Image (cartoon, grey):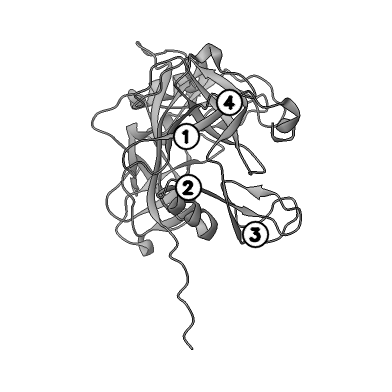
Amino acid sequence: MTAAPPPEVLRAPLVVEFPFTRSLGPVQGAFLTALRERTVLGVRTSDGRVLVPPVEYDPVDSAELRDLVEVAPTGTVTTWAWNPDPRPQQPLPTPFAWVLVRLDGADTALLHVLDVPAPDTVRTGMRVRIRWAGERSGAITDIACFEPHDGHDGTEAARPGPYSAGFPDPVTGIVVPARLDYTYSPGRAQTAYIKALGDRKTVGERCPSCRKVYVPPRGACPTCGVATGEQVEVGPRGTVTTFCIVNIKAKNLDIEVPYVYAHIALDGAGLALHGRIGGIPYDQVRMGLRVEPVWTEGGRFPDHYRPTGEPDADYDAYKELL
């Protein structure tokens, strides 16, 4: 007798990407502005230590820090790790070392990369210097990398020293793209849920202990801690339990504002899922509204939910699902 093959579990690449915007303040703004001008700044604490990169508040006593200090572009590797396979957008396209470098005049180390050909050419204690980027904009990438430095160019003796000159056109904020690339697998339970959506069905799983039906299914009951395996088709109709009105248009989303996003308890489900409400003015959406899914041609999930025309559900029928 041959056992049935296990069900196929879905896998797909997933990218999470967004621009991260941050205002810098006077200390870190000065730090990035100085990098644009090929200068490295730290900040001096009340006990005389120099922190690079600088921070606004002393990590020991939380005192506000504003005493900027210029340090040297040369320093010493305090620890390192080899990166044999650089990823896209990393500082160097060839293998390199991640290093912590304590610049001359600083008491803390700066994380960056060291351009060396092999791991046997880097060591703790080696001397390095900054290689500046050809085009600089006021970002940590203005330091292209560190490189080995065996000589003395006089910069060690010239720094550290007080810094008060300032630079024109200071950097006050940054916008940095944040991106995560990975392969996502929804697991056995949600694979079945996604495949059922392709047939315009919504399938959950029932806990064998508390009998609650989870939609989307999770493969286990978070309350009882037991595996779920019994599939239960729910809906397609449901009840709006609560909702919000969206007034900000999302990038790449072709929906006119305002619109309503709601928690919808499908008939037979033990908790609510979320979906957009359409087919009704946004200011007429209400708790207890009975709705049904509207599927797009070839869509794998409902485009939105619309009113069914039924009387509103009684509050007691869905109050436990809020």
Residue neighbourhood size for the residue with mark 4, other residues' Cα within 10 Å, grouped as few (<14), some (14–19), many (≥20)? few
Q: Quadrant of the C terminus?
A: top right
Report the amino acid beneath label 2. Answer: Lys
Say which residue appears at 53% left-offset and 17% top-offset. Answer: 245
N-terminal-most mark, 1 or 3: 3
Point out residue 1 in the picture as x, y percentages from the top left corner.
Answer: 49, 89
Say which residue appears at 56% left-offset and 32% top-offset. Answer: 51
**Marks 3 and 4: which is nearer the front?**
4
Pick the residue in front: 130 or 136: 136
Report the amino acid beneath label 1. Answer: Pro
Report the amino acid beneath label 4. Answer: Glu
For residue 228, which numbered disc appears in the image?
3
Pick the residue in front: 124 or 90: 90
Q: Are marks 3 and 4 in contact (CB under 8 Å)?
A: no
Say left or right for 227 vs 33.
Answer: right
N-terminal-most mark, 3 or 4: 3
Q: Circle 4 sits in a helix, a strand or a loop, which is it?
A: loop
N-terminal-most mark, 3 or 2: 2
For residue 293, which numbered disc appears in the image?
1
The image shows residue 177, relative to residue 244, as above or below, that is: below
Report the amino acid beneath label 3. Answer: Thr
N-terminal-most mark, 2 or 4: 2
**Marks 1 and 3: which is nearer the front?**
1
Say left or right for 296 vs 7.
Answer: left
Say left or right for 58 vs 38.
Answer: right
The image shows residue 17, relative to residue 309, as above or below, that is: below
Name the residue tied to disc 2: 201
Residue neighbourhood size for the residue with mark 1, other residues' Cα within 10 Å, grouped as few (<14), some (14–19), many (≥20)? many
Q: Are marks 1 and 3 in contact (CB under 8 Å)?
A: no
Q: Circle 1 sits in a helix, a strand or a loop, which is it?
A: strand
Inter-mark Cα distance, 3 to 4: 33 Å
For residue 208, which numbered disc appears in the image?
none
